[in-house]
Image (cartoon, coloured by chain):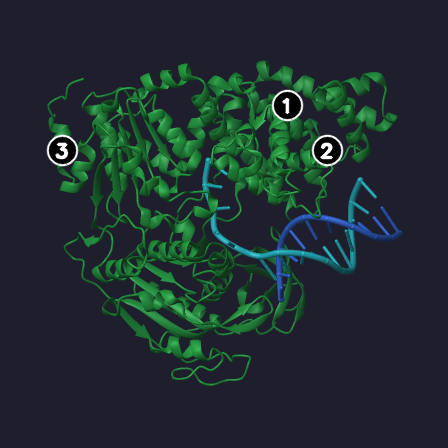
Chain colours: A green, B cyan, C blue
Amino acid sequence: MTTMPASAAAADYLARLNPEQRAAVETVDGPLLVLAGAGTGKTRVLTTRFAHILMTRRAFPSQVLAVTFTNKAAREMRERVSAILGQPAEGLWLGTFHALCARMLRRHAELVGLDSNFTILDTDDQMRLLKQVMDAAGVDQKRWPPQGLMAVIQRWKDRGCTPARITPAEDSDFANNRARSLYAAYQERLRQVNATDFGDLMLHVVEILRTHPDVLADYHRRFRYILVDEYQDTNLVQYLWLRLLAQREDPSQRNICCVGDDDQSIYSWRGAEIENILRFEKDFPGATIVRLESNYRSTTPILGAAAGLIARNSGRLGKTLRPGREDSRGEKVRVVSLWDSEEEARMVGGRIEAARREGHNLAEIAILVRTGSQTRAFEERLITLGIPYRVVGGLKFYERAEIRDAMAYLRVLQQPADDLAFERIVNTPKRGLGDTALRAMHQLARAEGVPLLVAADRMTAMGALRPKPRQALRELLEGFARWREGLGREGHVVVAATLLEESGYTEMWKQDKSPEAPGRLENLKELIRALGEFETLAGFLEHVSLVMESDQAPEAERVSLMTLHAAKGLEFDTVFLPGWEEGLFPHQRSLDESGDKGLEEERRLAYVGITRARKRCIISHAANRRLYANWSSAIPSRFLEELPPEHIEQEGGARAERSRMMAAPSVFSGQFPLVARKPRIIEAGAWEVSERPAKNAAIPPGTRVFHQKFGYGRVVSTDDNKLDVEFDKAGRKRVLDSFVEKA
DNA sequence: CGTAAGACGGTTTTT
DNA sequence: CCGTCTTACG
């Protein structure tokens, strides 16, 4: 295929790139590694390159394989490619590793003993299945926790190891070297119920590509170009998959382009291997490497602080972020020392309030923490100040019990052999089909080698069980027969609604008088609505298992609160990075479990945090923090010392303080007053901005109140400044009176 | 079969 | 301290 002369439009999209980005886009043939530092236009390069391949007619859309880690990234790429092309991009193999593998596996399922309409299990179902396997093998689950075995199995799957590929020597010592055989039993059980877990999607496909040269050759003919996002986050099995697909016969046609940043590799605990990116040149001989180092996001001090910090890591591919903006001068990164975690929350809250008064957009402010539990203190403070916020990455729609139940009904409808789904709903709502009935069904199913549903059917026919449960079971089975039959006639949306009614499932929640019940019914309606957006039930089920996301619209003016991990890929004008204390950040567990490697990953996490900020970055640490029950003193994080002084401005406490604190952690001198064990709340400080007066002096029981987090409710009883409130949606909670207002 | 008291543990999270 | 999961009882 020859290169087409660049059209006017083509020149246009290329002209907007800097030289290094342009090189990354135009080096189309042969292996290419793009090392893209934070804020250097990685996504732009990836999408432009994709569009460039299509515009220059090097390949049809169906001949490009583009892989991302998240659905969000895949969606974004699809949209931006379409925008450059000026039309919707269709027929693309663009998606997450798991979605693409699911698509491949459905085409070749029979090669691993599955039927192409297999179910993808969620973690819940995975655990239940594994527990069943352990029960059957007589493993003591007190002594050998199922989570432990699941972790071992997942690690094997992350490395592309099927049970047959594990040698006895590689067996884990779990349950006296039985991990391997339990793994085999678990896989066998998955096959019986025609299901896969997430790891299987990759594992099965890699196994197929390894053992069926004809299938592999077919994909080699198909995929002329491969694009990979976030390469530093790939695990071994993903790497194997890519390598298999990229190793085309003619070495000059191995057109794989991987984009990533070794400095932002923060998922090793999930199986990601930073070595994949470090080793790229060896894996793909003759590879070109392009570095994107012009940062268009942040000010010079922010880049300088981040660069100085990350330079402490060893074994980097090496890359230096340069300010790419004209106006890159800006305020220094602030390091604020505080007495305790409450004061830290007040400092952050106060500054946010000040920023709001100055007219800053709250959506451009983020508080990034190391652990999820840290958000609470900030939430409380923001509520007190009346500042709207959102916590990113909380509970997800598809993880709620009622949604899972409804999904289980739909799964049985779609796939009668889905024993896990059947088991979940057979007695939900209660039908008197408890342990005894279920055990009988299991026994028959195992004996006859049939799915639970079939066994249940035979039992009703045989007249097994007591009359009452038997009748209930018969009704349920008749229901499924009827609903399944209705699928063709009335369509999946109507059937789903009917099913939830006739099975008694919605009735169950209508009868439930807990405060959550109305919300759950709402969620079920929402589920039916979502179902309507899909052509088929199968399509919907696939979507839900692979795209487990809550549609959190970034919506209005709200401060964002999230973990550092969740913040990767995002950016804000102002970023608060609290809790930079030894043990918390770097996290003790990371150090204990992974030593220097763990420390370096924590440092990368710090680097990710700092580089989220466009204009302002405020790092803080507290000398005292409440851990579970009691207060303990905390040493400032070693990362603070590693920040280059010329880019830092210290507030409230000298930098030299750290060494002295280390020597005598319980004695704080200098800035901090010497106080007894329990730190008093110190009200002074430049950041103390107006605190809302305690206007809720007296709220008698029975008062209708509003709480920013829990919504409306009624006061049940009071205890000093604490209120017991029965919230309409959130249930009974104990809250401080200053957090509510009279409704 | 459903509720209630005790044990336990308490990074990071996507698919 | 606080929320979750297990286990014991009515």
Is disc 3 placed on a helix, strand or loop?
Answer: helix
Q: In this view, does A61 lie to the left or right of C9?
A: left
Q: As shown in the figure, which amino acid type bears the numbered disc 3?
A: Asp
The quarter of the picture where the N terminus of chain A appears is top left
Q: In this view, does A602 lie to the left or right of A250?
A: right
Q: In this view, does A700 lie to the left or right of A391?
A: right
* Distance from Cα at disc 1 to Cα at disc 2: 15 Å
Is disc 2 placed on a helix, strand or loop?
Answer: helix
Neighbor class of circle 1 (other Cα within 10 Å; few <14, some 14-19, many 20+) is: some
Sequence-wise, the earlier of marks 1 and 3 is: 3
Sequence-wise, the earlier of marks 2 and 3 is: 3
Residue A658 image point, x, y percent? 38, 75
- What residue lies at 21% left-to-right and 60% top-to-bottom? A300
Q: Disc 2, disc 3: CB below 8 Å?
A: no
Sequence-wise, the earlier of marks 1 and 2 is: 2
Q: Disc 1, disc 2: CB below 8 Å?
A: no
* Distance from Cα at disc 1 to Cα at disc 3: 55 Å
Residue at numbered disc 2 = A136
- Indicate which disc residue A12 carries: 3
Q: Can residue A456 be seen in this view?
A: no
* Chain ID at mark 2: A
Closest to the camera, between mark 2 and mark 3, is 2
- What residue lies at 21% left-to-right and 45% top-to-bottom? A292
Closest to the camera, between mark 1 and mark 3, is 1
Q: As shown in the figure, which amino acid type bears the numbered disc 2?
A: Ala
* Distance from Cα at disc 2 to Cα at disc 3: 65 Å
Residues indicated by labels 2 and 3 sit on the same polypeptide chain: yes
Q: As shown in the figure, which amino acid type bears the numbered disc 1?
A: Gln
